Amino acid sequence: MKEIHRLDEVDRRLVRELQRDASLSHAALAERIGASPASVWRRVRSLENAGVLGKTVRLADAEQLGRAVNVLCQVRMNRQTMADRSEFESFIQSREEIVECYSMSGEWDYLLRIAVKDVADYDRFVMRGVLAHPSVANAASNFALRQVKYTTEIPV
C-alpha cells in the first residue's frame, strides 16, 4: 500500500482547485488559494513528484462523441490463475470501449464501465469480445438510464 502524502491546508485548496479546473495558470491558482505564483509552482511540482497529482487531461462529452450509452458489466472468470487474470486484464487495456475496470471482491471478479453508441454496438462488443474471451465464464450487464452524478474530484 502506498504511503499517504500529508497535505497542509494550502495543498488541499490547491488540489481542490486543480481537480475542478486544471487549465488555471499558476497566477490564477495563486489568487484563488491565497499564495504566491512561485509558491504555487513549487507546490504543484512537489505534489506531482509525490504522485498526489497525476496527468492533466480534458474531459470529453460522451454524448457529443456518439458514446452516450453507459453499460456496467460484471464479469466472472472461469479460472482464477494469475496467467488468466493477466491475459484478461491485457484484453481490457486493449479495448477502447472499456473506460473503467475494477477487480472486485465478492461474487463477480470484475466490474467494467463500457461506453458505446447504442445497444446493438454493446451486443457486438460483449458477444464478440468479453464473452468470447477464453477466461470469461459469464457476464451480467446493466444499462444506465441516466447519469445522476459524475465527478472525477477526490475529496481532500
Image (cartoon, rainbow, N blue to C red):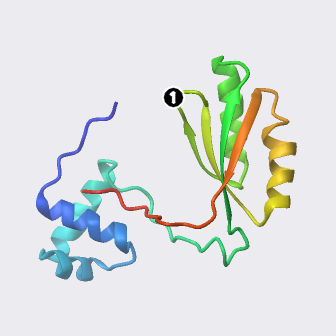
Q: Is residue 96 left or right of residue 113?
A: right
In which quadrant will I find the N terminus?
Answer: top left
Q: Is residue 134 left or right of residue 49?
A: right
The furthest residue to the front:
145
Residue 123 percent coordinates (x, y):
84, 52
In which quadrant will I find the C terminus?
Answer: bottom left
Residue 22 percent coordinates (x, y):
38, 72
Residue kind at label 1, given as amino acid type: Ser
Residue nearest the observer in this picture, 80 or 83: 80
Residue 35 percent coordinates (x, y):
12, 74
Q: Please tell me which residue is depicted at 71% across the width and 68% down the height of the picture.
A: 67
Report which residue position mark 1 lands on.
105
Q: Is residue 139 left or right of residue 112?
A: right
Residue nearest the observer in this picture, 55 or 156: 156
Q: Tag 1's secondary structure?
A: loop
Q: Residues within 10 Å of mark 1 (few under 14, many from 20)?
A: few
Q: Is residue 135 left or right of residue 52?
A: right
Q: Please tell me which residue is depicted at 39% across the width and 77% down the height of the picture.
A: 23
Residue 155 percent coordinates (x, y):
29, 57
Residue nearest the observer in this picture, 26 or 87: 87
